[in-house]
Image (cartoon, grey):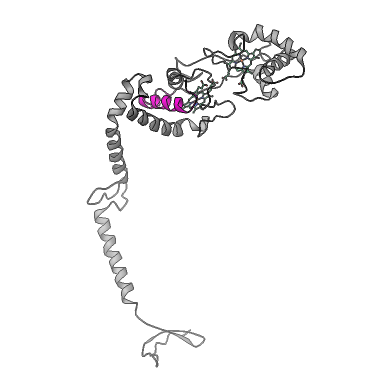
Amino acid sequence: MSDKVEKDEITGTDTTGHEWDGIKELDNPMPRWWLWTMYASIVWAIGYWIVMPAWPLVTSYTSGFIGYSSRGSLEQELAEASQAHAADRATLLTMEFSAVKNNDQVYQFAIRGGKSAFAVNCSQCHGSGAQGSPGFPNLNDDDWLWGGNLDAIYETIKYGIRSDHDDTRIGDMPAFLTDELLTKEQINDVAEYVLSLSEERKDMAAVDRGLEVYMENCASCHGDKAKGNRDFGAPNLTDAIWFYGKDKDIILRTISRGRANVMPAWTGRLDDTTIRQLALYVHSLGGGE
Ligand code: HEC
Ligand code: HEC
């Protein structure tokens, strides 16, 4: 490389003086269009700094001539939306639950709001389609632990189940082995009996013994016919819908060690409009009574 600037004979342009293996570089000026685009960008940037929020300062930022902020515009949109629904909200809060279905506008408002509140607050436990999973009930079917009419669903959501709220729903499945209420054999028998209610079993002697154990220890909560009891949230044991799972091992575990799943109380975290929207939404999922 040499730094000797000379004139190129063919084009009459100066070279830059750089040379690689005899190849020299012409010192052409920047294209006009390129330069003007760059000047225009600089002018645009200065204009932008003046008009829009731009430079960070120590505790704030330059807010710009028009004072725009994306948070502010979102707040305004939210305020407008909430004003547009103020009437629906007020009606929903005062109307009898049973009457809401007959008011199409308020009902649609409730279902839409309930659906989005469900996605945010409930789907992590109940599943995005409310289909549930072991220990978390399916809310689409008509098998209800605590009741499937609007008032019952509303109460469940508001106060929770075994939650920390004073008005929570309560009722525990005892731990029959841990608390030495039954022996392992008795628990096996009663599990056979429970299973016999929804499917055929081979060991009918165990089923018969299990019926006796059942009547003495379980009927007070699950009912004489094992159809469940909503006052304690005791599941129906005769259908093929299992809350914790249908395998014998799982049923043995439930009876031996007990169960007490928790559903949080939502009053205090969600406002009453949202809780009502959720009750109407859950009720609409297919299994509402
Ligand atoms: C932390 C997990 C959790 C979250 C979050 C949760 N739930 Fe639950 N939910 C449960 C559990 C567990 C049960 C069953 C409790 C039991 O054992 O009876 C339940 C039961 C229910 C029931 C009663 C079902 C029946 O058969 O009676 C309804 C209704 C319900 N949830 C609605 C909701 C709604 C609506 C939300 C959102 C606001 C929600 N849940 C959020 C865990 C959760
Ligand atoms: C004090 C009331 C009470 C008594 C007594 C009781 N249970 Fe329960 N049982 C419950 C409750 C409440 C649940 C639901 C637990 C939960 O929601 O976490 C339950 C759940 C179950 C389940 C789980 C059902 C499913 O769908 O997964 C089985 C099985 C069961 N009980 C069997 C029995 C048997 C067998 C006995 C007698 C040896 C018995 N229970 C006695 C209240 C009771």
Q: Nearer the viewer, residue 155 or 166?
A: 155
Query: x, y percentage for residue 58?
Result: 32, 48
Query: x, y percentage for residue 204?
Result: 76, 14
Residue at 53% from the left image edge and 25% from the top image edge: 141
User: In terms of image quadrants, where is residue 15?
Assistant: bottom left
Does 157 appear in magenta?
no
Residue at 28% from the left image edge and 51% from the top image edge: 53
Q: Residue furthest top?
A: 216
Q: Nearer the viewer, residue 105 or 76?
A: 105
Magenta range is 266-289
Answer left or right for 286 relative to 13.
right
- In the displayed structure, 107 sits above or below 159; it is below
Q: Residue furthest bottom?
A: 9
Q: Residue furthest front?
A: 102
The number of numbered discs placed on residues in the rendered structure image is 0
Residue at 49% from the left image edge and 27% from the top image edge: 286
Does 272 appear in magenta?
yes
- In the displayed structure, 287 sits above or below 116; it is above
User: In terms of image quadrants, where is residue 76?
Assistant: top left
Answer left or right for 103 relative to 248.
left
Answer left or right for 190 relative to 130.
right
Residue at 43% from the left image edge and 32% from the top image edge: 115
